[in-house]
Image (cartoon, rainbow, N blue to C red):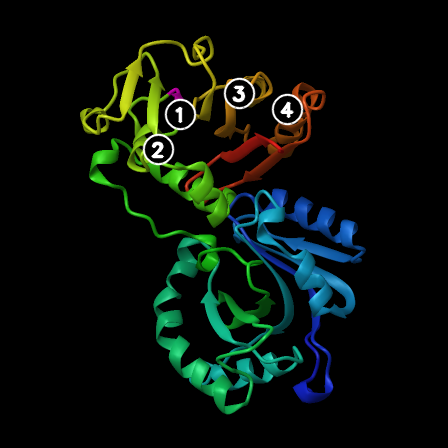
Amino acid sequence: MPHTPDPVPYETTDPIAYGLLALCRAGFEKEVAAELEALALKIGLSGTVRATAGNAYVVFEAHEAVSFGELAEACDWRSTVFARQLLPWFARVDALPERDRATPLVTAARTGGQKFTSVLLETPDTDEAKQRSAFCRRFAEPFETALGKAGLLRARSKEPVELHVLFTDATTAWLGAALPGKAALWPMGVPRLRVPHEAGSRSTLKLAEAIFTLLSEDERNALLRAGLRAVDLGAAPGGWSWQLAHRGLRVTAVDNGPMAASVMATGMVEHVRADGFAWRPQRGVEWMVCDMVEQPSRVATLVADWVGSGRCRQTIFNLKLPMKKRLDALTQCKALIHKRLAQVGPYDLRIKHLYHDRDEVTAYLTLKK
C-alpha cells in the first residue's frame, strides 16, 4: 500500500507527491488504469497502478517521492479520456477517528510541503460513497478553519494550489492537489445540470457538458456565435438541436424520426427526414453534431469525412464503445480519423468520457488553422 511520510514542517520541505489519483465512472477502472500507466511512462514516472472494479477510482503509486510541481504540470484531467478527475496525490490517511477527522487530515496536509488557497472534499461516484456527501458538506467549514489555524490555508497567492481530499471510505482519505486549470471543472468531475423542459430529451445534457468540457471559454465564445449554421445528424427527438438553437445557431436536424414540438417551436430548427449517413448539405456549415447509435468505426469515418471534405468546420460526436473492448475500439476510431485527415492537414481531436455518457465517449474534431 502507498506510504505516507511522517509530518514535517512545510517551511523546510519542497512540495512533493507520491503518484496519481483518478476518479471515473464505476466499471471503467481498467481503462483509467491503462491511461495512468501510459501517462506515467510518458513523464518518466515509475510505479504501480492499483485499481479495483467498481470502486470508481484508480491510484498510481510511485516508487519514490517526486516533485509536486513537475507532476502537477503534467497532470491535466483533459489529457485522459476516461478519468473524470486527475490529481497528484501526496498523502493517505487510514483509520480516521469518528470524532476528530480534522486533526489527522491537517497533519497529513502538512506533509505535502505547501500551503493551499482552497479546499475541495470529494468522494468516488458510487452509491456507497455518495452517502458521505452530506458529511463532506458539514465537514468543509470546520476543516478549512483547522487548516487556517495550522497556517496551511491562505486566501490569496501568486501560485494558487487547491487541496483535494478524497474520502474513499468512512475511515480513509487521500490528499491530492491541483494547479489552476488542471483539475476537473466540477467536484468529482460531476456537473450538476438540469434538463430544460423544452429541450425534448435528456440527451441535451450530453452536448451541454461536452461544450464546457471540450471547448475553452474563448472557443465557446468564438465558435458558438448566434447566426452560425449547424447540422444535427440523428437529431430526433431534438435534445442536441435544442442545445445549439438555444445558443442562437440555425440547425438542420436530420432524422427520419419525429422531432419534439418544443424544439421546433424555437423557430431555429429545420427538420429534414433523411438518413444521417446519406444526407449531405448543399454548402459547408460551421458545425455538425452527431449522436447516432451505430458502430463507432462507422461514425468515426463519417465525421472525419465531413471535416476532411469541408462540409463542416468542426464537429462534436459520440462513439458508442463495446463494453469489453473499449480501448481497442477507441484506438481503431482514432486511426480511421487520422487516415482520412492526415493528408488534409493538422487536426485537433479531443475525446472525453463525460458524466452523461455511459458506454460511449464524446469527441470534438476540427482542422487546425
Q: Which mark is residue 23?
A: none
Pointer 3 local density, CA inside 10 Å: few below 14, some 14–19, many at least 20: many
- The magenta stretch is 229-234
When the figure is inspected, residue 102 is found, relative to residue 255, above or below; the finding is below
Q: Quadrant of residue 279?
A: top left
Residue occupying the point 56% across, 72% down = 160
Residue occupying the point 38% across, 65% down = 133
Residue ID for mark 4:
337
Pointer 2 local density, CA inside 10 Å: few below 14, some 14–19, many at least 20: many
Mark 2 and mark 1: span between their CA atoms?
A: 8 Å
User: Are the two marked residues, 4 and 2, in contact with CB atoms closer than 8 angstroms?
Assistant: no
Residue 124 screen position, x and y as percent: 48, 57
Work out whether residue 324 or residue 150 is closer to the camera in this orientation and state it.
Answer: 150
Mark 1 and mark 3: span between their CA atoms?
A: 18 Å
Under circle 3, the secondary element is helix
Q: Is residue 142 left or right of residue 163?
A: left
Residue 55 screen position, x and y as percent: 53, 53
**Reading the chain from its start, which is encountered first: label 4 or label 2?**
2
- The answer to if 233 sits in the magenta stretch is yes
Residue ID for mark 1:
230
Under circle 2, the secondary element is helix
Residue with the most extreme bottom position: 149
Pointer 1 local density, CA inside 10 Å: few below 14, some 14–19, many at least 20: many
Between marks 4 and 2 in the image, the one whose residue lies nearer the viewer: 2
Under circle 1, the secondary element is strand
Residue occupying the point 70% across, 79% down = 5
Mark 4 and mark 2: span between their CA atoms?
A: 24 Å
Residue ID for mark 2:
244
Q: Quadrant of residue 231?
A: top left
**Reading the chain from its start, which is encountered first: label 2 or label 1?**
1
